[in-house]
Amino acid sequence: EYDATAFLPGRRAGLPGLRRAAAGCQGCPLYEDATQTVFGEGDTSARVLLLGEQPGDQEDRQGRPFVGPAGRVLERALADAGIDPDGTYVTNVVKHFKFTVPEGGRRRIHKAPSLREMTACRPWLEAELRVVRPEVVVALGSTAGKALLGSSFRVTEQRGALLPWPGLAGGEDGGSGGEADEAGEAVRGLVATIHPSAVLRADDRDAAYKGLVSDLRVAAGALD
Ligand code: URA
């Protein structure tokens, strides 16, 4: 079974140690075609952890999360919601870019990660939560929501509310258990919203953007 666990450093590792170890992760086959691991980054003691799906094309090339078009939407939305982007930690459920190149094409087209890949990558997220100890976690889009709340998660139904933190150990999709309990200890709640890239694809971008900002305000409100 796919699993990143064997690639994790000792429990005392901080973010730099985790990042170095994650660079060599072969816990699932996605490392084979991706350029590099895209580990989370941001404020080590961030109060808000933002969780995306997986790196996109730009992120894969640059090795940093949310530096492409979706990242620009996210940055603006955070500012409009009153969340200082410098006070956040940004990461993804899956740390490698998954894509296909259509026959005769050159562009790399994003593919949604499978549950196996999400589960394999989970120890990295647990480790990030253990180190950063955020107060609020924001799930950006369906994959992030499903990773935290299970496969029955629906963005349309659960977005924009402060949900109780489900923990990472249990859940219908299984966590790695044990040590996972400690990851997210400090988390007070979870806010789900749409993925910023959905704003770019929406027919009514303005409405979609406003919805994203309004959901992020719920996360901001949970801090004070
Ligand atoms: N989309 C994501 O979910 N994560 C990124 O890092 C970039 C785009």
Image: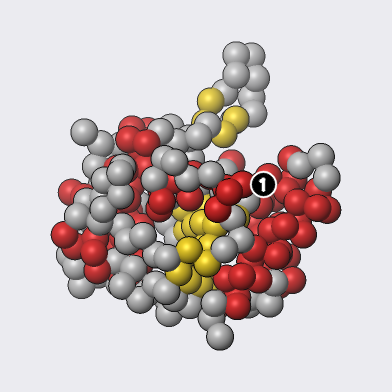
Q: Residues within 10 Å of mark 1 (few under 14, many from 20)?
A: some
Above or below, comparing residue 110 to residue 133 in the picture = above
Above or below, comparing residue 172 to residue 133 in the picture = above
Colour scheme of the rendered structure: secondary structure
Above or below, comparing residue 174 to residue 181 in the picture = above
Residue 11's spot in the image, x, y percent? 19, 67
In the rendered structure, the answer to whether residue 144 lies left or right of residue 86 reads: left
Q: Nearer the viewer, residue 128 or 213?
A: 213
Q: Nearer the viewer, residue 79 or 212?
A: 212
Task: Determine the residue located farthest toward the front in the rendered image.
Answer: 157
In the rendered structure, the answer to whether residue 207 lies left or right of residue 35 reads: right
Q: Is residue 215 visible?
A: yes
Residue 131's spot in the image, x, y percent? 33, 72
What number of labels is visible? Answer: 1
Q: Which residue is depicted at the point 48% across and 63% down?
A: 163
Above or below, comparing residue 224 to residue 77 in the picture = below
Quadrant containing the N terminus is top left
Residue matched to label 1: 197
Q: Which residue is depicted at the point 44% across and 41% down?
A: 152
Q: Quadrant of residue 120?
A: top left
Residue 221's spot in the image, x, y percent? 60, 78
Q: Which residue is depicted at the point 57% across and 71% down?
A: 219
In the rendered structure, the answer to whether residue 26 lies left or right of residue 212 reads: left
Quadrant containing the C terminus is bottom right
Q: Which residue is depicted at the point 32% across and 61% down?
A: 167
Q: Is mark 1 within 8 Å of ligand 1?
A: yes
Q: Nearer the viewer, residue 183 or 10?
A: 183
Kind of residue indicated by mark 1: Ser
Residue 159's spot in the image, x, y percent? 59, 55
In what element is the residue under mark 1?
Answer: helix
